[in-house]
Amino acid sequence: MSTEAKNSTRKTTAKKTTRGTTKKSTAKSGWDAKALTDKQRAYFAQGNTKSYDFRLERLRKLQEVIEAHEEAIIEALQKDFKKSPFETYATEIGFVLGEIAHARSNLASWMGAKKVGGSLLNFPSGSYIYSEPYGICLILGAWNYPLQLTFGPLVGALAAGNCAIVKPSELAANTSAVMAKMISENFDEAHIKVVEGGKEVAEKLLAEKLDYIFFTGSVRVGKIVMQAAAQHLTPVTLELGGKSPCVIDKTANLDLAAKRIAWGKFLNGGQTCVAPDYLLVHKAVKPRFMQLFKEHIKAMYGDDPQQSPDYPRIINQGHYKRLVGYLKEGRILTGGDTNDKERYIAPTVLDQLNWDDQVMQEEIFGPILPILEFETIEEVAQQIAHHPKPLALYLFSEDADHQKYITENVSFGGGCINDTVAHLVNTNMPFGGVGDSGIGSYHGRSSFQTFSHQKSVMKKATWLDVPLRYAPYKGKMKWLKMAFRWT
């Protein structure tokens, strides 16, 4: 999920040791990157994590620990975001528990060897795909959904039979502390270890030889992670972000569109990687849509959203100031109110913008929604295609041809027709980006596959040995060609 502050910087003034760690940070955190990876590698080599029973029991334990700490998680997210208990459960606790339940129910079938079709050239034989754990996985979490985006990937890593080092974002400090406590008190650090800290901690971990890296954050930091992974040829999943468009054509159910867009945009105070980043609204329905949009904002958050118990705050002053800067562009159609002390920004819509404005150059990651107009569906596809591929796309339309056209002609990570954000909760669908919005996917079985190497094995019978492949080759060419045609 995006914005570079998900893995924000925090300079260290500690004196460096010869191995690149710092005396100050190592003493404070009580861990050493190399010692930790060595410990987990030794544990993994013993085969402890590979059995079905072990994986199932650890998933069950993680579920129990999350359930036992429900109130602590809710309290931590209140402190970090002023996030409501309902939203915390829906987007954090319940989400992860759903992933665990799905993994526990399907683990046996996921782990089993998959028999696949054979080749006439290898007759007689059987062909199988085995899912093999990578080993030591590093999970770099994000601040905007700190539990979901850290423990969600962890579910996949555990189900696949790996050891895991988890670094939550330091920006959601209260939630990070709760997660560290949950894991340290209930899991062997040789299997799972939560390491807290900022940029310097991530750098130390990335310098080690790892078997898989899963990163959620900004495009900028994603490039740094990928560069570090390249030093050891470590495979990566990068869950990034981008400007996710939301399209409303003239056939849309405008009232429902306004309601669902307001929910998806202002969820978590707009700090959602798949939130609608900007609107493309058909010129003919724009006035009516805006009227309904304002009504639904009021219905959800009242006359003064600052007083609503359901409206979160911006994570820190840096992000707050960046977002307030956008309010100087275009014309405010609704919202625009701010409070520096509370880091409050009202649900806001900006009009009279173009693609050269700063708010249209970056992922917003806040409760500000630019609105642009269009006249033809082809124009929509062209505008989106001129910019990096988005993580999500939303289309509100009753026109089946428009739905087909956008789905087939616009590249994006995933999305919804006539809804926003809700595609994430379906564990049967992979979630991930494309191009600048990410590499790889997860959720449900996709998480298990992401953290597993797919090992192909052919089992050849010994009761027959077809001589075609062996020299001398004279007179065999026609039979070889026939065999390839029949394969």
Image: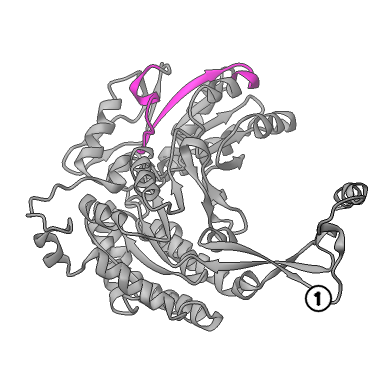
Query: Residue at the location (62% across, 76% down)?
Result: 108
Snapshot colouring: one colour
Which sits in the foreground, 128 or 249? 128
- The image position of residue 468, as x and y in percent, is 86, 58
Q: Residues within 10 Å of mark 1 (few under 14, many from 20)?
A: few
User: In this view of the protein, which residue sits in the foreground, 4 or 16?
Assistant: 16
Does residue 452 appear left or right of residue 466 in this picture?
Answer: left
For the point 58% across and 52% down, the residue is 430
Residue at 44% x, 35% y is 242
Nearer to me, 346 or 381: 381
Q: Position of residue 447 (x, y in %)?
A: 53, 60
Locate residue 459 relative to residue 418 in the image: left or right. right
Q: Is residue 207 above or below residue 324?
A: below
Residue 46 is situated, as x and y percent measured from the top left of the image, at 43, 81
Q: Which range of residues does the magenta coloring cover? A: 356-379
Residue nearest the viewer, comparing 227 with 68: 227
What residue appears at the point 45 percent right and 40 percent down from the top-left corner? Answer: 275
Mark 1, residue position: 462
Q: Is residue 334 above or below residue 45?
A: above
Kindly indicate the quadrant of the structure image that contains residue 257. Answer: top right
Q: Is residue 191 visible?
A: no
Callout 1: SS: loop
In the rendered structure, which amino acid carries the disc numbered 1? Answer: Thr
